[in-house]
Image (spheres, rainbow, N blue to C red):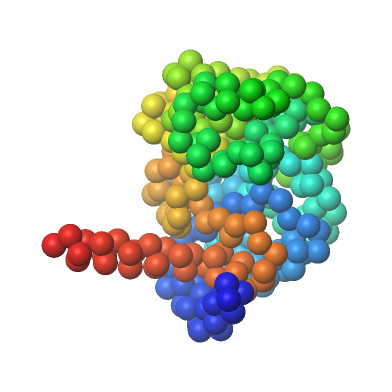
């Protein structure tokens, strides 16, 4: 049923309408996490055909100049969060098709056999529920069931240093905190550690120029933005649905998340931002009911 709905939406003409009315003059930033090479190639070819794919850093330069005329129409940026080891399998496709990509790395998980907490024992833990409690409580609860964020397991889930260095010749690497916590659920000292040390580690150990951070889960408060600014970042990215103009708040950049899908119809619909219209409709409906 879900697949049928997305197929109907795709062929309804609404995604095309979104591209013509909104994406034509704004910058769309997409968020991915993991894609198989087969799915990535299909998705990337679609994006190349329907958008002008630009690098995240080139968009930053336009924001600094406040000059929308420096942007091609239908500008789109591709980002990946986490630095999962599977991202390495996409390098050949990215190079072959000359696609600019940014990967946001968790500095405490890459180049190790440490694991992402949100991938651990999904049958036992509900990630949605874990995101509602304090960072300390989450770590204590998961620790009671065998997970520690600094523990080395039998196999890596994140990219190695050699892979990152090889990929960085073609891919922009930026910050995603140290261990990927829900920052608003952290004590101030924890949030500072996660935000500040990720930048320091990536710059000192890899020689990267880190000027941007993607908030894990897209979660942030004014406190996190203040820490980001004090740490020396110039930009931060959220997961709030929307497009970006050249006058966008550089610390609240919006992204569209196609989700963990290999369904082409769903990808086309979600990469157009059609869900934004649905959210607007729900908000209007809610306001009407409250009147």
**Which residue is located at x 55 percent, y 27 percent?**
138
Q: How many marks?
A: 0
The answer to which quarter of the image holds residue 259 is bottom right
Q: Is residue 249 above or below residue 193?
A: below
Residue 262 image position (x, y, % from top left): 70, 64
Q: Is residue 273 above or below residue 101?
A: below
**Which residue is located at x 69 percent, y 38 percent?**
121
**Which residue is located at x 33 percent, y 64 percent?**
282
The answer to which quarter of the image holds residue 76 is bottom right
Out of 130 and 10, give the one closest to the viewer.
130
Residue 48 in view of the camera: no
Out of 172 and 197, give the one closest to the viewer.
197
**Which residue is located at x 46 percent, y 36 percent?**
132
Q: Is residue 289 left or right of residue 235?
A: left
Which quarter of the figure is the N terminus placed in?
A: bottom right
Which quarter of the figure is the C terminus placed in?
A: bottom left
Q: Is residue 3 left or right of residue 61?
A: right
Residue 258 in view of the camera: yes
Residue pushed farthest left?
291
Q: Is residue 166 left or right of residue 184?
A: right
Residue 235 image position (x, y, % from top left): 50, 37
Residue 22 image position (x, y, % from top left): 43, 68
Residue pushed farthest top?
189
Residue 21 image position (x, y, % from top left): 42, 73
């Amino acid at each position: 049923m879900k697949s049928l709905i997305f197929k109907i939406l795709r062929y309804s003409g609404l995604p095309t309408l979104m591209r013509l009315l909104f994406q034509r003059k704004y910058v769309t930033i997409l968020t991915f996490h993991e894609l198989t090479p087969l799915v990535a190639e299909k998705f990337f070819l679609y994006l190349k055909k329907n958008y002008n794919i630009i690098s995240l850093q080139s968009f930053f330069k336009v924001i600094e100049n406040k000059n929308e005329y420096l942007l091609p129409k239908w500008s789109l940026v591709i980002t990946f969060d986490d630095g999962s080891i599977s991202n390495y399998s996409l390098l050949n496709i990215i190079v072959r098709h000359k696609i600019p990509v940014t990967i946001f790395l968790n500095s405490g998980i890459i180049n190790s056999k440490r694991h992402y907490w949100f991938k651990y024992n999904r049958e036992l833990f509900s990630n949605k529920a874990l995101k509602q409690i304090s960072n300390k409580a989450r770590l204590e609860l998961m620790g009671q069931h065998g997970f520690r964020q600094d523990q080395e397991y039998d196999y890596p889930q994140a990219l190695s240093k050699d892979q990152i260095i090889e990929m960085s010749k073609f891919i922009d690497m930026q910050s995603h905190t140290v261990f990927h916590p829900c920052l608003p659920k952290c004590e101030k000292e924890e949030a500072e550690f996660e935000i500040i040390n990720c930048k320091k580690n990536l710059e000192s150990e890899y020689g990267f120029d880190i000027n941007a951070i993607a908030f894990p889960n897209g979660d942030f408060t004014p406190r996190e933005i203040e820490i980001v600014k004090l740490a020396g970042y110039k930009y931060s990215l959220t997961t709030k649905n929307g497009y970006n103009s050249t006058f966008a708040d550089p610390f609240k950049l919006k992204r569209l998340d196609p989700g963990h899908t290999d369904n082409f119809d769903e990808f086309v619909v979600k990469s157009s931002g059609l869900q934004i219209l649905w959210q607007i409709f729900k908000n209007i409906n809610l306001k009407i009911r409250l009147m």
